[in-house]
Image (cartoon, rainbow, N blue to C red):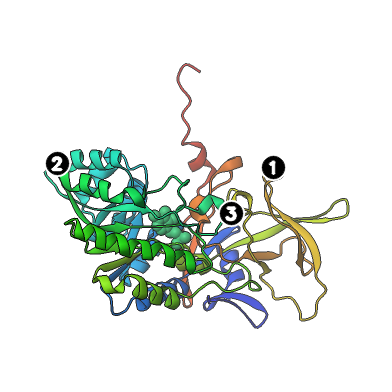
Amino acid sequence: MDHFLYRDGVLYAEDIPVSEIAAKVGTPFYLYSSATLLRHFTLFDDALDGMPHLVCFAMKSASNQAILKLLADAGAGMDVVSGGEYMRAKAAGVPGDKIVFSGIGKTADEMRLALEGGIRQFNVESEPEMQVLSAVATQLGKTAPITVRVNPDVDAKTHAKIATGRKEDKFGIPIARARDVYALAASLPGLKVIGIDVHIGSQLTELAPFEAAYQKVAELTEQLRADGHEITRLDLGGGLGIPYTRSNEAPPLPTEYGALIKNTVGHLGCEIEIEPGRLISGNAGIMVSKVIYVKSGEGRDFLILDGAMNDLIRPAMYEAYHDIIPVIEPAPGVDQQPYDIVGPVCESGDTFAKQRDMPPLKADDLVAFRSAGAYGAVMSSEYNTRPLIPEVLVQGDQFAVIRPRPTFDEMINRDTIPEWL
Ligand SMILES: *Cc1c(COP(=O)(O)O)cnc(C)c1O
């Protein structure tokens, strides 16, 4: 459920017509709904009711500080995967003890940053990382709370580029080796083992892979406790999928996911963390773009938009499907026609959809890409020297630009030409 709906024939974001924002901000731009973000966070928070827990928003899915502050004010922690994300979360006012640090390639500098600024835990992914974290913490006279990310060898049945829990994936430590690795952790100075971490992939549309993974984590918890480790926290990762089309089957709900967590690990008395990204931010954002030209090709018509693959890369990178809807609601029963919907970037990969049925559109019409709130703005680039597009946040009948469009000068002046040229 989201808050981008037609009212009286025009698309609204909460209580504001999208066209009104487009007129003020210019296209293309990302547009987020506060009510949708909060609704999705609350669904997760409520689903874990009755267990001590923290919902850590995977901020790599949408990292604007306004979004982070909105969620943090509602009680969210943050899951960060780089020093930059850590600093961004801190800048948005998130306290260190609500920030979890994930990722397979944490550098010593990033560890130092987090240890000095305060951190809830590091999710450690390898023995070499563990050695470095031990050294950095000892040097600073600090103790680093850690979990070890285990790889449960479960197929998440999702797109290959976002599956992370199979044994051939680069993430975590094979669960069969976990007891040895925990023994190493316990022997190293500067580390305090507090729990176990698992994350098997993104855009999961079934609960079975989660169930398989969490059962393995429950077994491991008991083994590790028998080995003498204090396991008080389980970080169960993110990955619950969202519907990208309204026709396809609805993925499981956070309530069902919460019930599964209770059933698989609830008896262990651990504090539970989850790290949802996409399910909180995905349907809370749209990308609004304008038709520049309608071009008739050989047997097909192209809708050439002012948004491109550098603004929203998911179709080019993951063959992802996004619903694309006109901002003016088509009259009922209007004849649809197929278009190839493309951006202006100079590669054929800059295609959002092929032969997509749409109502007839003309130059200057606005369209909205639905479900663009996650892995949209954060993955955008300035390819073709196209400015990063603005982000806008709506709350009720007010909106604010939360990241402005840079000027050409701002972009170009970041280059420096060496004096020898
Ligand atoms: C990407 C990621 C997430 C979030 O995944 P979603 O599919 O957006 O929920 C959570 N935890 C880790 C470690 C990740 O890498």
Q: Nearer the viewer's eye, disc 3 or disc 1?
A: 3
N-terminal of the two: label 3 or label 1?
Answer: 3
Disc 3 marks which amino acid?
A: Arg
Q: How far, Cα to Cα, is label 3 from label 2?
A: 42 Å
Q: Residues within 10 Å of mark 1 (few under 14, many from 20)?
A: few
Q: Residue furthest top?
A: 420
The residue carrying mark 3 has its beta carbon less than 8 Å from ligand 1: no
Residue 74 rendering spot, x and y as whole percentages: 33, 72
Q: Amino acid at mark 2?
A: Thr
Q: Where residue 271 sits: x, y (%)?
A: 25, 68
Q: Which residue is mark 3?
A: 314
Q: Position of residue 212 (x, y in %)?
A: 43, 64
Residue designated by label 1: 347
**Which residue is painted at 21% across and 44% down in the image?**
184
Residue 98 seen in the current view: no
Residue 391 appears in view: yes
Q: Are marks 3 and 2 in contact (CB under 8 Å)?
A: no
Mark 3 and mark 2 lie on one chain; the one further toward the N terminus is 2
